[in-house]
Amino acid sequence: MNDTVKMFLISLIVAVLVQILMGPQIMKMNGLVPANQVAPTPQPVVIQQPAAPTEPAAQAPQPIPAPDYRGITAKKARSLASAQGIVIIEDEQREAEDKRPGEIIEQLPPPGTMLVNREIRVVTAKGKDDVRIPSVVGKSLEEATKELEALGFEVPAPIPQDSNKTPGTVLDQDPKPNSRMATGSDVKLTIASLPMLEVPKLTGKYLRTAKSTLQEAGLELGQVRRVEHAEHGEGYVLRQEPAAGDKVPFGTEVSLVVVAPN
């Protein structure tokens, strides 16, 4: 075998060995995958959504010291307690000779105790089912209220009515005197109030007449401003404030603009 044939055989053997040993690497470099291998399935990209913001939990009301409601009626205590969100619960009634019907004689928790649930349970003085209502007509509102509450009745806000009597004097009551009702019932009072007066027409009059007209109407002369005027004489009323026909309380001052001296 000559040298040429030997060299050819050696080159062929080397080429086969290189193909066997380096084949997978060459295929990988060229992006080829052997037929017996399956390319991995690409996994979907999951984008996480930001968590929805949670609303803050409602804060429980802060504890407050229990007010002292002893000595007043349960109805009045409820009116006062509602402003602080406190609920008054009437547990029972007891006989109490020295207490007004409906008056709170015990409360739980005691005054000054820190309230967590804003509830106060009370015991009230037992009332009566058939009590005569006294006459309070002609008395002041303060006197009438004190007398009625001492018997266990409730007195709501009075009804004002124009009258020439002293303001606050009781003009009427409902129910009428000598009626009989259960304690805790309402007795409505009508009281005198300052009457609303109609302002008379003063323009076109002279100052002296305007003063007497105001006095007769129960009103007062207020500021008087004088201005020049070519057509009317001294003291002639040109304008007034409040205007004629307005409703004002007794004793209101009426200001005038009058003609100044020539």
Image (spheres, helix red, strand yellow):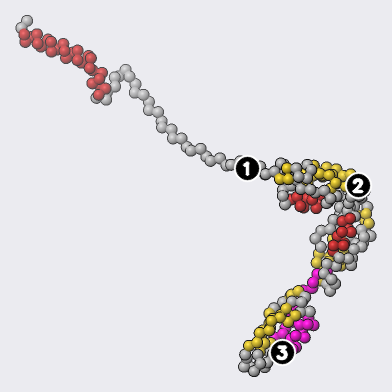
Left or right of 220, for residue 187: right
110 inside magenta stretch = no
Image quarter of residue 246: bottom right
Residue shown at the point (85%, 46%) measured from the top left:
105
Residue pointed to by mark 3: 206
Amino acid type at circle 3 is Tyr
Question: Residue 256 at x, y = what percent?
Answer: 68, 83
Question: Residue 216 at x, y = what percent?
Answer: 79, 82
Residue 96 — which label?
2
Amino acid type at circle 1 is Ala
Image quarter of residue 185: bottom right
What is the C-alpha distance between the residues marked 1 and 2? Answer: 43 Å
Left or right of 146, for residue 117: left
Residue shown at the point (87%, 44%) measured from the top left:
93
Q: Quadrant of the C terminus?
A: bottom right
Q: Residue furthest top?
A: 1
Tell me if residue 245 can be seen: no
Residue pointed to by mark 1: 58
Q: Element at badge 3?
A: loop
Dot 1 or dot 2: first in sequence order is 1
Counting every numbered tag in the picture gives 3
Residue shown at the point (72%, 83%) measured from the top left:
201
Dot 2 or dot 3: first in sequence order is 2
Query: Is 11 located above or below residue 100 in the figure?
Result: above
Question: Residue 168 at x, y = what percent?
Answer: 83, 67
Left or right of 243, for residue 132: right
Amino acid type at circle 2 is Ala
